[in-house]
Amino acid sequence: MTAAPPRLGATRLVAVDGPSGAGKSTFARALAEQLGAQLISTDHFATWDDPTTRWWPTLERALLRVADGHEARYRKTDWSQGFPCVGEGDEVTISPQGTIILEGFSSARKANVHASYRVFVDHADEQARLDRATARDGEHQRAHLIRWQQYERGWFAVDETRARADYVVTSS
């Protein structure tokens, strides 16, 4: 992974993708700690109604600043009330450095030309993933999570995310 060439200026971007409840956040946190890397989550941008599209240019603009050797800033989506408030969360600074981990659904998308390495974290049991995500986010989010899983299935089929991964982790 660290041998992969940087594609974000002098910074190596590792994308950790996979379906909701598969364990990608846990994997990415451990990887970031091991590598001394900054961790950024697509949950900082996504909403229930916009899992992948309108927010991507905002993240890409920030990544391009990092590629040019500059710090970039954005405001996270605030999920503290149980629903997304776009741009109302804490400000995050992304610094050009050796490695940045971009964790979350659609982080390893085909359009992410900055990724030096793509990891796909998978868990085959969709019901177990739904139960994990519901335990994490609350029973009141179950209907959103079911719709999210449906969206993920379509996204992964079209984007071929798993097939393009450099490394696949199967969680239990």
Image (tube, rainbow, N blue to C red):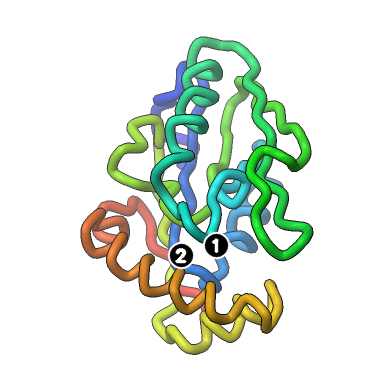
Q: Where, by quadrant of the figure, is residue 158 drawn?
A: bottom left
Q: Position of residue 13 (x, y in %)?
A: 49, 34
Residue in the image at 39% along x and 62% along y = 168
SS at mark 1 in the image: helix
Question: What amino acid type should be assigned to the residue bearing mark 1?
Answer: Lys
- The image's mark for residue 24 is 1
Crowd rating for badge 2 (residues with CA inside 10 Å; few <14, some 14–19, many 20+) = many
Crowd rating for badge 1 (residues with CA inside 10 Å; few <14, some 14–19, many 20+) = many
Q: Is residue 35 visible?
A: no
SS at mark 2 in the image: strand
Q: Position of residue 27 (x, y in %)?
A: 59, 60
Question: What is the spatial separation of the Cα atoms under label 1 and label 2, in whole angstroms?
Answer: 5 Å
Look at the numbered discs 1 and 2 and tell me whether their residues touch, using CB distance below 8 Å: yes
Front one among 63 and 121? 63
Q: Answer above or below: position of 67 versus 46.
A: above
Front one among 117 and 161? 161
Q: Is residue 87 visible?
A: yes
Residue in the image at 68% along x and 72% along y = 137
- The image's mark for residue 94 is none
Q: Earlier in the sequence, mark 1 or mark 2?
A: 1
Residue in the image at 75% along x and 42% along y = 89
Q: Position of residue 54 (x, y in %)?
A: 43, 40
Front one among 82 and 163? 82
According to the picture, the residue beneath numbered tag 2 turns out to be 121
